[in-house]
Image: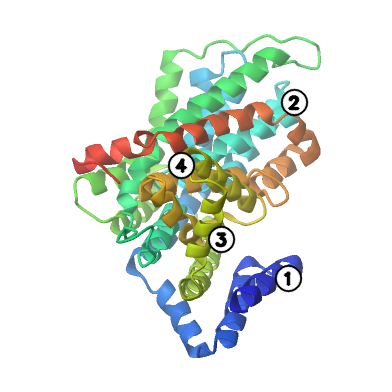
Amino acid sequence: MALTVLCVTFTLLLLMGAPVAISIALSCLATYWVEGLPLELAFQNLISGMNVFSFLAIPFFIFSGELMLHGGIADRIVDFARNLVGHWRGGLGMANVVACTLFGGVSGSPVADVSAMGGVMIPMMKKEGYSADYAVNVTTHAALCGALMPTSHNMIIYAFAASGTAGILAGPNVPVKGVSIGELMFAGLLPVIVLMVSMLFAAYWVAKRKGYPVRPDGSSTLAPFAGWRAITVSFVAALPGLLVIAIILGCIIMGVTTATEAAGIAVAYSLLLTFVGYRTMNWSKLMMSAARAGKTTGVVLLLIGVCSMFQYIMAILEIPDRMAELLLSATTNPYIMLFLINFILFLLGTFMDMASTILICTPLFLPLALKMGMGPVQFGIVLLLNCALGLNTPPVGPTQFVGCAIGNVSIEQVMKTILPFYGALFVVMTVVTYIPGFSTWIPSLIKGAPVY
């Protein structure tokens, strides 16, 4: 009965258009009441779920990204990327991929990446003779790298969700281990590099097949090579902004700070860089950055709090065990099972935001993934990749909507030419899913021991 109430109320509230956080909270309260649990317990779970020291990294990372977004780093990254690869066939598209990947490491947010890079690159690409759908697809797919970068607050959310699942057993006497935020940061580096290379191949292949750029006069001449001096100058100009990634990872490797403290250092560095170094920050931009960071942080922490209520209900009702039994009744083959988990995660990501998908799906699928031989670090990268892909897939797809709005093109038109970029993403997804070392190798080097 309680499980029926939970599922039905949650579904009805979503269909009525209620925000995901409100839908989870109200459905949990209804389930608490049906189960005869005191409602005070629900609010205790809500508050305790948000009251975690490591969550201070979330507002720090978000604020640092907002400062970089409004502090002029995007333009410098674009200049460097264009000088580097802009003279090749489809060079502006490839420059877009490089720029989105680099800025994703600064912002840690695919949506912010599309907003910043898309606002610069999409109009530029259209002016240079690239079609609007190509410009949007290149931008929105390359921006997904931000979900796996060290500055991504979604990694912290997953680490919390995985730790909250520690009481759920993956099998007899096999407890689910917590996940280090530092391990996740390093685990995403190699997949990001391969994802960027895959996007570069996709951008080049489509551009070559269609002869881009094709200008209104019918010409398709390529831009001249900017020269190594221009590349060096633009790289030096962009380097101070990109150093935020090195600062975070360096502090963690040397053991100087925790990930939370490194996030605070990133904010201090961003303030110093934008106010003193680039001198592009003013009081108005600072207040805008703080307001946007506060709003995003509030939404994320509310989701974390209500999902703590949800995780408690799932433990009481043994929902992860039931989900595992259901999927195991279909197949016990690890390869097929991992494919099914990917497929379900992808479907859920198409209509739920990234944080909600992480918080809801981690307790459901992490124990099952462990039973199939996939470690929590590897599963985290797989989950983040699926959620990132959902950001670019209707009906929700916020990065897709932002990119189409900037490019002034319909989603239907963009979806007609999306397959090469989807293909590149699915190749990376397959490799990360079935080759554990692809995401655990670098963390194992840092720790000096295998990461499970």
Secondary structure state at the residue bearing disc 4: helix
Instruction: Give the CA distance from mark 2 to mark 1.
Output: 40 Å
Q: Residues within 10 Å of mark 3 (few under 14, many from 20)?
A: many
First in residue order: circle 4 vs circle 1: 1
Residue 82: % across, % down: 54, 23
* Amino acid marked by disc 2: Ser
Q: Which mark is residue 334?
A: 4
Say what secondary structure mark 3 lies in.
Answer: helix
Tell me if residue 378 comes above or below residue 292 in the rendering: above
Query: Looking at the rendering, in which quadrant would you find the N terminus?
Result: bottom right
Identify the residue under disc 3: 356
Q: Which residue is mark 2?
A: 131
Mark 4 touching mark 1, by CB under 8 A?
no
- Packing grade of label 2 (10 A; few <14, some 14-19, many >=20) is many
Please report whichever mark, 2 or 1, sits nearer to the chain's N-terminal start.
Answer: 1
Say which of marks 2 and 4 sits in front.
4
- Residue 243 appears at what percent x and percent y? 35, 39
